[in-house]
Amino acid sequence: MHRSFQRSTRGHGGFTLIELLVVISIISLLISILMPSLSRARGQAKSVHCLARLKEFGNALAAYDNMTGGALPPAQWTPAESNLETPAPDDPINPHDAKRPVTYGWSEILFAYVYGEEVRLRQSYPAQRNLDGRRFQKYFLCQAVGDEGVSSGHYRVYLPAWSGGSNGLEKDGRWGDTTRANPLHGAARESIRVRLPLIGDANELSERGDGLGVDDCSYIDAGEANYAGSDGRRNGNRFSDRHYGGTNYLFQDLHGAWDTKLREELSRDYDLNGVIDIDVRP
């Protein structure tokens, strides 16, 4: 007795159009659920990397102040012309800078202490602006913003702390009064208030990052911590809140931490002495 079996009208191992659409819909739904988590994970990784970089700066500062008896390097200084490299005639970066005064900052000093290699480029703030990317490897650029265009340096020192608060201030072009801190002066680290930051995430859109300012790529001054800039919005020379609405800082005791309120507090009380500095202006 023979039994007949009805053969399936569908090919073996195949899928109908509806089944494919269901699978695609499920995959799309899973991606939409996972993408925010993946984005947050990437952002968190960049924030952790940023804090680790600030700690590296702290290690370099520790090595530097061991050699200098506790002093921080200046936020701004002029290298001797005899120590600078002569630019190549066909170098696309150097031709105009070769005739301009060259200014260096704390970043060139720290780079030398970290890598044991002196910076000698005939350009202002070359390490912090990553002007030789192959050499500096974006050392002073936060991963959260990258380095498109002419970088302003994404880490800057907080000058009122770095220069020792009211030590060495300027008025009418002369040092010694109380208008603003002297970028040529690096304070003894032990003399700085413990809660004050030494270095922090800087605004990558800063007006002082385009080569036009005398203190380009170096520091954030009193009154500038939360300064909106000329457009009233984003281009001020200030600390940035790019990491989940907060800023990464390296503090006086060389520990790194994330904070959401400190930059606003510094804009009101630049030396954190409990007195509101209403007359401080950028």
Image (cartoon, helix red, strand yellow):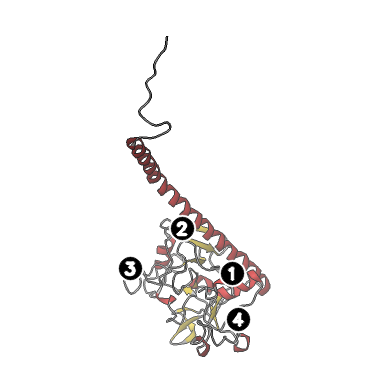
> Of label 4 and label 3, which has the lower sequence position?
4
Give the structural element (helix, strand or loop) at label 4: loop
Give the label on residue 120, or none. 4
Give the structural element (helix, strand or loop) at label 1: helix
Asked which quadrant contains residue 226, the reply is bottom left
Asked which quadrant contains residue 6, the reply is top left
Residue 232's place in the image compared with 178, above or below, is: above
Residue 24: percent from left, percent from top: 37, 41
Q: Residue furthest bottom?
A: 99
Location of mark 2 (residue)? 259
Q: Which amino acid type corresponds to the residue marked 2 in the rendered image?
A: Asp
Q: How far is the residue under mark 4 from the one under mark 1?
A: 27 Å
Q: Which amino acid type corresponds to the residue marked 3 in the rendered image?
A: Arg
Q: How far is the residue under mark 3 from the one under mark 1?
A: 33 Å
* Label 3 with label 2: CB-CB less than 8 Å: no
Location of mark 3 (residue)? 233
* Label 4 with label 1: CB-CB less than 8 Å: no
Q: Which amino acid type corresponds to the residue marked 1 in the rendered image?
A: Arg
What crowding class fits label 4: few (fewer than 14 Cα within 10 Å), some (14-19), or many (20 or more)?
some
Location of mark 1 (residue)? 189
Residue 8: percent from left, percent from top: 37, 26
The residue at the point 35 percent across, 37 percent down is 22
- Res 71 visible: no
Give the structural element (helix, strand or loop) at label 2: strand
> Of label 1 and label 2, which has the lower sequence position?
1
The residue at the point 43 percent across, 47 percent down is 37
